[in-house]
Image (cartoon, helix red, strand yellow):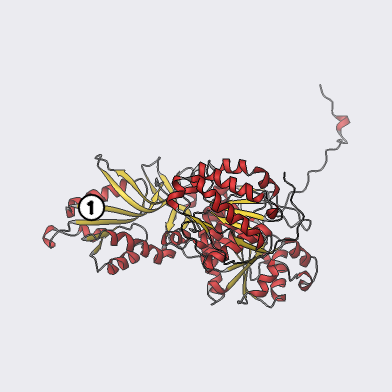
Amino acid sequence: MLEREQQTPPTTFDLVRFGLGPGEEPNEQQRAFYAYVARIVAGHTMRYVGSAAAFHTIDTATALVETESIYEPLYRALMELPDRADIGILDLSVSTRTVNTELFLRPEALLHLASAVSAACGSEQWAARTLVILLPTEQAEDIRLREQLDARLASGQIHLLSDGGTASWPGTDEDDYRSALARLQTASIDLFERKLITRLGWFRPHGRQGERKVLRHYFDASRAQDELGHLLDEAIGADRPDLIVYHESVSDWLANPLKGSCISAGSLPIRSFSEAMDTTPTDGPQPRSVLLVVPVVNTGVSLTERVTTLHARLRPERLRVLSVLCVGGPQPRFGRRRIEGNDGTEHEVAYFLSVEQRTESEAECRLAVVGETRRYEERTNTLTTAEFWDLVRTCGVKPEDDVPAPRRRGYAVVPDVPQILEQYGNWLADKLWMFVRRSTSTVGQDILLVCPEREQGSRKLSNSLSLRSGAQVVRIPREDIERVVKGTAPEQVFDARAPWCQELDSVATKEVVLIDEFVGSGDTIRAMERIARAKGLNVKAVCTLLDFSPDAAGQRHSLYGWKPPASQTDLPAQRPDADGAAVRRP
């Protein structure tokens, strides 16, 4: 391991001014993202230098042919940074869209990059500096980059962060990094995916009696109407059909944005599938091109039947099929999939987004007990008993990780909240946000979410709520919360240098929502409330996923309240029987 020079805490950061093609200054949104990255690495708020130094660039075409040509401009850009900042950020990420990263997906380019980085970071100027490299989603080729930089990664002089959230050093808030990346992604498909709700339930049993399967997921895009409309605008405008036909079996989240897109495209004719089936050849000229639009394609069996029926009824020269969602699509976005009918006829289906569906037999999910879920787009801010325990059954349990020790012992078994939020975070965040909206008229961007720091469940929950609403998140260190729990006045834990105090002091809003993954005694929530009020903030709502003390909830809102059974008392020790001597064994 390299020995790092003793240094004062870093205070400034800047970008390594290197790029393919003309370099561009980061916009306000990108600067906020880089500031967040610097804070993750440093552990406190950093100042962006924002130097006006020129970019060291290289023509993309040249770099693709002569990968060794990236060494010199990258090395020069790296060597200029130590004079102006403590931390440098070299951005090669796909998600930030600041450079053409096609080059850096090639192993030979990664080796030249590693050589330039090693040479620069081995210099005296970099002895007390830190370099953060933002990479595309981690790939097998990255191992060669890591091997060449291994010693400097181990020393902490260099940090790697990938678009997938993986990091080269422990303790990184990987979920926070993914959340920060998501805020940079403002394309319609990014926003649509962010707002799409995957609900767990027991939907649409199908198949023969005794072999019937139940769909476990319902996909609800009712919160993403604008984004879906933009996607449909592009799809319809690219190839204007004579008629658009749509089919919805259980919900209406497709019809309105599709009708709006038809109007935007010049009032294209649009009919529901049933209306199209009522059409007879004498109703006027038949359309030469038809576009059939459906919300989701799963196995494709039902869809091929509709395509065949529509073809027989309207007899178009060309019939295209577009599905908003595709179960198990070959590409994650904007893909195409072939489906086959019972007669062997194949059809190509274009889709926007691939999703994952789960199926279970009626016996596996005990459908006879829980019953079929018939309300697809329910609007409640709680979980039913069946829904909660189904989430636990699906995502599992674990020992409590983030325990407020030594105040109380950890629960031996709790729901795996991080895993639940990883799979169904949009659904649960939407439920909690419904409660928040009923508690305040303030718009989401002007609400502050406050939760404990470095607790997986609370972090994922607050990130989901922040992405759902645009609200800012502030995390209070556990040790400061515990001091207030023990009786310390909140004013005595305030530190003007601490990032969380700076954030609470600098926010324009005064309305706060307190967040925690679950509540035991309620001491953590009460301590955060005292801290918020001591800062002059108005606590509008308190939200948790699970409340272990529902009898004492007060104004606290949880998706599910459950009082765990009291632990069993220890069995009495075995002792000699007074009558044992009288027992005679043969």
Residue at mark 1? 319
| Residue at the spot 50% in from the left edge and 48% down from the top edge | 69
Screen quadrant of the N terminus: top right
Residue 291 position within the rendered picture, expressed as x and y whole percent measured from the top left: 26, 56
Seen from the viewer's position, the closer of residues 117 and 190 is: 117
Relative to 577, 215 lies left or right: left
Whole-percent x, y for residue 259 in the image: 30, 66
Q: Position of residue 367 (x, y in %)?
A: 46, 48
Point out the residue furthest to the top here.
Answer: 586
Q: Is residue 545 visible?
A: no
Q: Is residue 544 left or right of residue 320?
A: right
Above or below, comparing residue 150 to residue 436 in the picture: above
Residue nearest the viewer, comparing 133 with 224: 133
Kindly give the residue lying farthest to the left in the view shown.
282
**SS at mark 1 in the image:** strand
Q: Residue at x 78, y 65 (%)?
A: 483
Which residue type carries mark 1? Leu
User: Who's the residue at 62% across and 72% down the image?
Assistant: 512
Q: Quadrant of residue 556?
A: bottom right
The quarter of the picture where the C terminus appears is: top right
Q: Position of residue 224 (x, y in %)?
A: 42, 64
State left or right for residue 8 relative to residue 135.
Answer: right
Q: In front here: 5 or 332? A: 5
178 vs 132, nearest the viewer: 132
Horizontal side, residue 312 vs residue 48: left or right: left
